Image (cartoon, grey):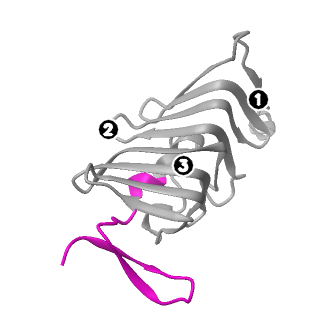
Amino acid sequence: MGQGFDMRGSAGRRRRVPGLKPLPCAAIVLLGVAAAAAQAPALDDAEQPIHWRADHAEVDAAGRTILTGDVRMEQGTLRVEADRMVIEYDGDRVVHVAAEGDLARYRQRPWPDAAPVEADAERIVYHAAEERVELLGRAYLAQEPNEIRGEVIHYDVRAGRIDAAGDGDGRVEMIWQPDRNEGESR
């Protein structure tokens, strides 16, 4: 029997979608790494089952899974919402994930006592090999009380570096609050 993915239909019965691959953990990392602090791993989210819903799903011969129409993905504390999501594979390995829409949205609690990290952009792209995330078009990244806005935000996961660029006037807006507890410990 060929590769496929079991999913529940609207009546709650399981059905097999031939050729549809389950979304690997790397797809879920889509934005989790973009917004979380570099050394702060998510709450076992990568080990949780992946739940996704979309109005339509298709798999093509090129190794892409395309989800369209009110796409919602959940894994542990991670939530991603988009109008369209494309997952590209090389064999069973995710190489590229793109979520897009009027605004694609991401939310995740990176560790138990932390405020949730939120991001949105017209297009959110994860490059697995480079461990790099891009927020493109009306990009926003925040973990209360800190936030950054720009036309484009690039996050290099390995380096723990965020680069942001503005729109036509080249401006980036950033609000960064100092850690109030840091001064108390001195």
Please tell me which residue is depicted at 69% across the width and 17% down the height of the picture: 167
Amino acid type, label 2: Ala
- Can the viewer see residue 3? yes
Q: Residues within 10 Å of mark 2 (few under 14, many from 20)?
A: few
Looking at the image, residue 135 sits to the left or right of residue 172; the answer is left
* Number of numbered discs: 3
Please tell me whether mark 2 sits on a helix, a strand or a loop.
loop
Amino acid type, label 1: Trp
Please tell me which residue is depicted at 41% across the width and 34% down the height of the picture: 158
Q: Give the image location of residue 24, x and y in percent.
A: 37, 60
> Within the magenta stretch, is there residue 8?
yes
> Within the magenta stretch, is there residue 155?
no
Q: Quadrant of the N terminus?
A: bottom left
Disc 1 or disc 3, which is closer to the eye? Answer: 3
Looking at the image, residue 2 sits to the left or right of residue 113; the answer is left
Amino acid type, label 3: Gly
Magenta residue span: 1-28
Q: Quadrant of the C terminus?
A: top right
Please tell me which residue is depicted at 66% across the width and 24% down the height of the picture: 151
The disc placed on residue 129 is: 2
Q: Give the image location of residue 66, x and y in percent.
A: 43, 54
Check disc 1 and report the residue beneath it: 176
The disc placed on residue 32 is: 3
**Mark pair 1, 2: CA separation:** 30 Å
